[in-house]
Every structure is written in structure tokens, then in C-alpha cells.
Amino acid sequence: AMMATPSATQYDSFASAYDNLNEFSVYNAHYERPAMLDLASRAIDDIIKQQNTATATTTATTTIGKIKINLSILELGCGAGHLLSPLLTKCLDRRDHDDVDDVDRVEYHGVDASSEMIKIAQQRLHTFIHPRIPSTNNASLTLSSSSSSSSPLQFHLHQLDLNDPHSLDVFPSSSFDLVISSLTLHYILDWHAVFASLARIIRPGGRVLLSTHHPAFDVHLVSFGDASFPSKEYSSSSSSSSSSSSPSSSSSSSPSYMDTSRASQVWSCSGGEPVQFYRRPLGAMT
């Protein structure tokens, strides 16, 4: 039988606690997030150079030595918005460079399944926007799938469950220069549907940056050799596994290291509730 996908609302009950943990934790704040932001920074530079090189070869009136910025960014699993501020700062601060003529358009779309995470991301966006953009006429923030605003700076947040294979159908083809997804893929069962959507919505020459758990990172969460899987839960606050009332697998065979398996873990911020996700071998990721 097909594994049940993690609940789209599982973060809602501890969104604020997770936001605080994510902000300062060693793993998120000092390891994974800086790595993704470094990759994103280099990708944005490459995209801007690529766009302006193409413009220079097709437009006789392009000002020599000056570049324009026209970027559309999609973040899958934006959560509480910890990536969006440094990501957008990277785009907007380019205005201060001597070689930049203007920011024609920066459009950011953040997607997350949790309504409570979206609320925190919205607050973080407001905090980011107001000090940097004096006139609200120059920027728009929406909580819908609409991109009809004529503002040069647009910020959109969408509550979408990526385990729905049609969730990204709201976006037109070839609509994004950069797609970034930080520690989100392990919540998604069907990667094929997501990757097919990404291939459709990324523009030619665009970049897709993804991060997820290494299978060795979660190996202790899977009860190998235990036919009651996935009824075992692992608590990060305890060195031992304990039984829970979660429904057990309908299969009589236990998972192996090479299987894609459902795992769960109780976090210090999750109020005792197990957070569910998937553990994949490297062969299933490539």
C-alpha cells in the first residue's frame, strides 16, 4: 500500500517555536542556510550577467557598462521566511553597485503548506520591506496566486501542499529565473511530479537549487528489521526509541537501508508531536 503523506498542517501547532529554533540552531543558521545562500548569491549573479549579455547582443540602445536587474524567484517550502530576507537583500542591494543601472523588477514567490508558517513569513516580509522601500507604491505583497500587480517589487506568499502533484500548476510555464528549496524535499513523496513542474516553470538558463537530508543523517530514525515500522518514533531528547500509537505499515516486510521509508522524529520545539518525513537512499535522489 502507498505510504500516507505527512500532514500539510503538521507545523501549524508549533510554527512559532520552530521559527525561533530555526533562527539560531547550529544546523540551520550556521551550516545549511549559509551554504544555500552562497549558492543562491552566485546563481543570482550568473543570471543577471546572462540576462544583460543577451540584452546587449539584441538591443542596440543598451547602455555600455550598466546592467539592469529583472528577477523572478520561487522558494518551495519557504517556512517562516528565514531565507527570503537575505535572498531579497542580495537582489535589492545590487542597486548600490556602480555597474547597476536600475532594478527593473524583482518578483518573489514563497510556497509553504503551513498556514501558520505563512503568517510568520508575511510578518518577516513586512519587516523587510518597509525600511528598504520608502513608497508602498513601489512594492506589493499578496497572499494569493495573483501576479497582476504592476509594481516593480512584488512579494507573493502561497499556501500550497507540494504533495499535491498539481500544486504548482498555478504558475505559468517559463516564469522563474531561480527556484530554491531548502530542506523541503524530504517531506514530499512524489519527487517526479515536483521535478516535472520545475522543468516546466523554470526559464531557459534559470537555476534550481535544492537541499535535503542525507540518508545517513536519518538512518537512526528508521526501525530496520522491525516489522512494526513505521510505528517506532525517535525523540531527539532521548537516546532510545519508544513505541507510539502511530498506525503500523500494512506490509509484512521491514524496510532496508535502500528503501524510501517514512520516518518521524520528536523535536524539542514540536510539543511532543512527531514530525513526519521521508528517508531516501542516495540512489533515489539522483
Image (cartoon, rainbow, N blue to C red):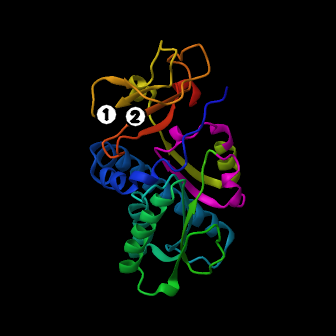
- Whichever of labels 2 and 1 marks the residue nearer the N terminus, that label is 1
SS at circle 1: loop
Q: Which residue is mark 2?
A: 265
Residue 202, image x and y in percent?
Answer: 65, 54
Q: Nearer the viewer, residue 157 or 211?
A: 157
Residue 10, image x and y in percent?
Answer: 48, 47
Mark 2: few, some, or many residues within 10 Å (few <14, many ≥20)?
Answer: many
> The C terminus is located in which quarter?
top right
Q: Nearer the viewer, residue 61 or 74?
A: 74
Residue drawn at x 56%, y 21% is: 259
User: Is 190 situated above or below 86?
Assistant: above
Residue 175, image x and y in percent?
Answer: 66, 61
Is 50 displayed left or right of 1 in the figure?
left
Is residue 239 shown to the viewer in this render?
A: yes
Residue 49, image x and y in percent?
Answer: 53, 61
The magenta stretch spans which residues?
Answer: 164-193
Mark 1: few, some, or many residues within 10 Å (few <14, many ≥20)?
Answer: few
Is 31 displayed left or right of 200 in the figure?
left
Query: Is residue 165 highlighted in magenta?
Result: yes
Is residue 97 shown to the viewer in this render?
A: no
Q: Which residue is mark 1?
A: 236
Q: Nearer the viewer, residue 105 or 10?
A: 10
Q: Amino acid at mark 2?
A: Gln
Residue drawn at x 45%, y 87% is: 135
Q: Contact, CB < 8 Å: mark 2 with mark 1?
A: yes
Query: Is residue 228 highlighted in magenta?
Result: no
Residue drawn at x 50%, y 21% is: 229
Is 248 displayed left or right of 34 in the figure?
right
